[in-house]
Image: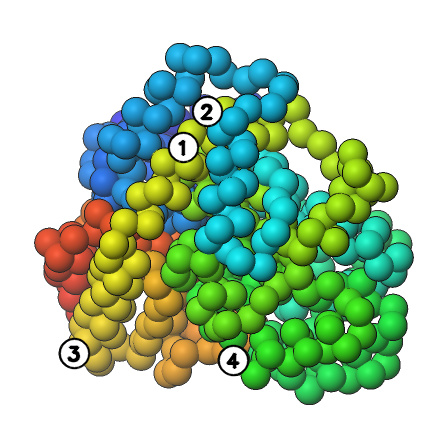
């Protein structure tokens, strides 16, 4: 064993469960040795053998302006020099809140936290606290972080392991969680008809990215908006992944639907731990210290993390940013589809803004059930062929991929060259 990735993986497994600090990193689904990353720049990162990869996970979404963007790095360095954490408020947090409220009009007030899990967990508590109801509605294959009552038929690493829920979550905690099919409008109607007055909230990834990329129908989102309004339930858009990824203003801007509460993360931290939840002021006033819903965090609104987030939010507002990101992502998925077709491999791909999905299937799936029909073994072989050719895709058939503003034409073309070779071998 001479590959340094192998050596590090062996070593990591001695002191860390599975050798990783977040399950999907372990390559359990695709097999093989995870790459240990030493540095990153623009669209690339390098492993422990100093092999370069074109990176299509971008830290699972945050690296939208490309890795180690000089403006972001400088902002972080300057903030770090002023102090790492104070546990007292800073002006940067106000700026960050103002920026988020301006960019996502349904958010009138916002609270910063450190992870998407905290954001959705707190949003849920707020919805329950504000309505005095217990029941929540979620959709199969949507992942909302690892809070107890949300770990029911969740996506991401849990789909990969084929494990619909998690050990260690008492049934009592999930008995209020109703799980419906994504894009199934009739089920929503039926659920609200049966128990609308008991439903605290509907939580949804308005563009789903944790069971591969699955887009909503307009009708699906519109129906949940209408039903929540009619029954006094809170509509929570979990835009931790799709917020500022499918476009400026997130999925709610794209589909023209206002959430009551929105959870954000990933892009808003620019690679450092920042997430947020916010929404209607009359709901947010239930949060402590104003109201009775408790939530807090030692490192919430951390000044270094906020500096990374603020500078990233400025960069993504530059003219043409999303037009370019969307165009590059389209070029990628169209090129991949053409390469598969030329090789005679059953494959399709889809994208929204800077987010994409690859499916070894006849047609683009619209639900968890449909995505599970795709050919996982083919994906796994494709993943390794691409990895060997220097392209790092999400190491699971059930994750979305991410393009950054630094994935220029040359990078996309290099990816397609690798893909043509990979598809030829799969045929
Ligand atoms: N919600 C969504 C939609 C996510 O994609 C994720 C993370 N992939 C989370 C919540 C949880 O965020 P975190 O990993 O920062 O806790």
Residue 116's disc number = none
Task: Residue 177: give x, y in percent of width and height.
Answer: 78, 63
The C terminus lies in quadrant: bottom left
Q: CA distance from mark 4 to mark 3?
A: 30 Å
Q: Residue at x 85, y 41 (%)?
A: 292
Name the residue carrying label 2.
304
Query: Who comes first in sequence, dot 1 or dot 4?
Result: 4
Q: Look at mark 3 in the image and give the residue it sits on.
A: 342
Q: Residue at x 78, y 34 (%)?
A: 289
The reply to whether callout 1 and callout 2 are in contact (CB within 8 Å) is yes
Query: In x, y percent, where is residue 258?
Result: 58, 67
Residue 88 placement: quadrant: top right
Q: Secondary structure at mark 2?
A: helix
Q: Earlier in the sequence, mark 3 or mark 2?
A: 2
Q: Within 10 Å of the Cα at label 3, are there few (<14), some (14-19), or many (20+) other Cα atoms?
A: few
Residue 308: numbered disc: 1
For residue 357, side relative to residue 423 (left or right):
right
Count up the numbered dots: 4
Q: Viewer-nearest of labels 1 and 4?
A: 1
Tell me which corner region of the image, top left, top right, bottom left or bottom right, holds residue 220: bottom right
Q: Which residue is at the far bottom?
A: 186
Looking at the image, residue 22 sits to the left or right of residue 314; the answer is: right
- For marks 2 and 4, the one nearer the N-term is 4
State the separation of the CA atoms marked 1 and 4: 34 Å
SS type, badge 4: loop
Q: Give neighbour class at mark 1: few <14, some 14-19, many 20+ (Cα, 10 Å).
A: many
| Label number found at residue 217 | 4
Q: Are marks 3 and 1 in contact (CB under 8 Å)?
A: no
Q: Are dots 3 and 2 in contact, CB under 8 Å?
A: no
């Amino acid at each position: 064993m001479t590959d340094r990735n192998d050596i590090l993986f062996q070593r990591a497994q001695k002191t860390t469960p599975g050798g990783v600090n977040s399950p999907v990193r372990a390559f359990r689904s695709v097999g093989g040795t995870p790459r240990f990353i030493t540095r990153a720049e623009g669209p690339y990162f390098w492993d422990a053998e100093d092999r370069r990869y074109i990176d299509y996970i971008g830290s699972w979404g945050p690296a939208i302006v490309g890795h180690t963007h000089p403006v972001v790095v400088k902002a972080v360095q300057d903030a770090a020099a002023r102090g790492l954490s104070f546990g007292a408020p800073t002006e940067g947090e106000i700026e960050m809140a103002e920026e988020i409220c301006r960019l996502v009009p349904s958010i009138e007030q916002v609270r910063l936290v450190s992870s998407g899990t905290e954001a959705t967990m707190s949003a849920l508590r707020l919805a329950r606290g504000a309505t005095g109801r217990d029941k929540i509605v979620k959709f199969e294959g949507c992942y909302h972080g690892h809070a107890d009552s949300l770990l029911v038929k969740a996506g991401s690493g849990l789909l990969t392991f084929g494990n619909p829920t998690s050990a260690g979550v008492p049934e009592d905690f999930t008995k209020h969680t109703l799980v419906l099919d994504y894009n199934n409008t009739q089920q929503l109607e039926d659920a609200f008809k049966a128990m609308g007055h008991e439903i605290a909230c509907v939580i949804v990834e308005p563009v789903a990215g944790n069971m591969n990329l699955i887009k909503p129908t307009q009708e699906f989102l519109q129906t949940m908006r209408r039903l929540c309004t009619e029954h006094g339930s809170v509509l929570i858009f979990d835009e931790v992944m799709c917020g500022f990824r499918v476009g400026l203003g997130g999925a709610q801007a794209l589909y023209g639907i206002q959430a009551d509460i929105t959870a954000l993360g990933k892009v808003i931290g620019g690679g450092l731990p920042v997430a947020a939840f916010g929404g209607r002021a009359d709901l947010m006033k239930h949060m402590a210290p104003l109201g009775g819903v408790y939530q807090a965090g030692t490192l919430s609104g951390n000044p270094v993390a906020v500096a990374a987030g603020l500078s990233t939010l400025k960069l993504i507002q530059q003219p043409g940013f999303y037009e370019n990101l969307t165009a590059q992502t389209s070029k990628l998925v169209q090129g991949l589809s053409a390469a598969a077709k030329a090789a005679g491999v059953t494959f399709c791909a889809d994208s929204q803004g800077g987010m994409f999905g690859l499916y070894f299937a006849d047609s683009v799936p619209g639900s968890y059930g449909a995505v599970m029909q795709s050919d996982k073994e083919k994906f796994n072989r494709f993943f390794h062929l691409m990895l060997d050719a220097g392209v790092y895709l999400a190491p699971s058939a059930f994750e979305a991929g991410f393009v950054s503003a630094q994935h220029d034409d040359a990078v996309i073309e290099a990816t397609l060259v690798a893909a043509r070779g990979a598809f030829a071998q799969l045929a």
